[in-house]
Image (cartoon, helix red, strand yellow):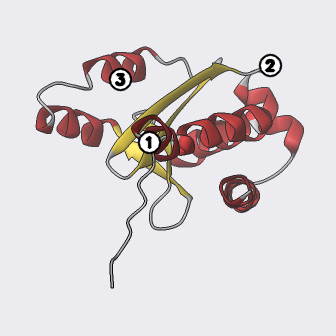
């Protein structure tokens, strides 16, 4: 019996491997206010401005907070390949903009946007606590990635 292995063209395979990046971008666009509110709410709750909100897709999509020290340590491991990311993290103004990292299978996507209204106002307008925002956004994230 002969086994037939069908392989996808390289461009299509690369597109499928990177589809998560497009899905994350779509998710962020659809949930900008909620993400801004979550980012601000976590900053208030943790009182630590040296953490960056991240979306980790493995094993299941969920949010995590990445301490700046962890990003710096990772940068050292990859021969300073994340210098630009560290510069953006250091220059981030959380009162006006949202900075997210998306992590999937050893890859990182940096997402930064100015929210309108600003993150503190988004948090006040949504009148929700951090736990409910996390639950809502994680549910939407799973739907986005499965759809």
Q: Quadrant of residue 122?
A: top right
Give the CA separation, mark 3 to mark 1. 32 Å
Dot 2: within a 10 Å radius of its alpha carbon, few (fewer than 14), some, or many (20 or more) residues? few
Residue at mark 1: 9
Q: Residue furthest bottom?
A: 1
Q: In terms of sequence position, does the residue under pointer 2 or pointer 1 come before the other?
A: 1
Residue at mark 3: 85
Residue at mark 2: 116
| Residue 3 percent across, percent down from the top left | 34, 76
Question: Split into 4 quadrants, where in the image is the C terminus?
Answer: bottom right
Question: In the picture provided, is 138 more to the left or to the right than 108?
Answer: right
Question: In the picture provided, is 70 more to the left or to the right than 93?
Answer: left
User: Between tags 2 and 1, which lies in front?
Assistant: 1
Front residue of 141/10: it is: 10
Q: In terms of sequence position, does the residue under pointer 3 or pointer 2 come before the other?
A: 3
Residue drawn at x 51%, y 47% as measured from the top left:
46
Question: In the picture provided, is 80 more to the left or to the right than 38?
Answer: left
Dot 1: within a 10 Å radius of its alpha carbon, few (fewer than 14), some, or many (20 or more) residues? few
Q: Quadrant of residue 1?
A: bottom left
Residue drawn at x 82%, y 51% as measured from the top left:
128
């Amino acid at each position: 019996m002969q086994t037939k292995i069908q392989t996808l063209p390289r461009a299509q395979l690369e597109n499928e491997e990177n589809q998560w990046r497009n899905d994350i971008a779509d998710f962020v666009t659809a949930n900008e206010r909620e993400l801004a509110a979550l980012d601000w709410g976590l900053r208030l709750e943790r009182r630590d401005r040296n953490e960056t909100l991240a979306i980790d897709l493995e094993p299941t999509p969920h949010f995590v907070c990445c301490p700046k020290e962890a990003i710096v340590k990772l940068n050292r491991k990859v021969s300073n390949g994340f210098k630009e990311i560290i510069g953006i993290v250091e220059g981030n103004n959380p009162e006006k903009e949202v900075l997210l990292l998306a992590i999937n299978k050893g890859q990182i996507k940096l997402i930064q946007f100015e929210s309108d209204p600003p993150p503190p106002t988004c948090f006040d307008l949504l009148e929700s606590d951090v736990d409910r925002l996390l639950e809502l956004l994680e549910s939407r994230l799973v739907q986005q990635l499965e759809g």
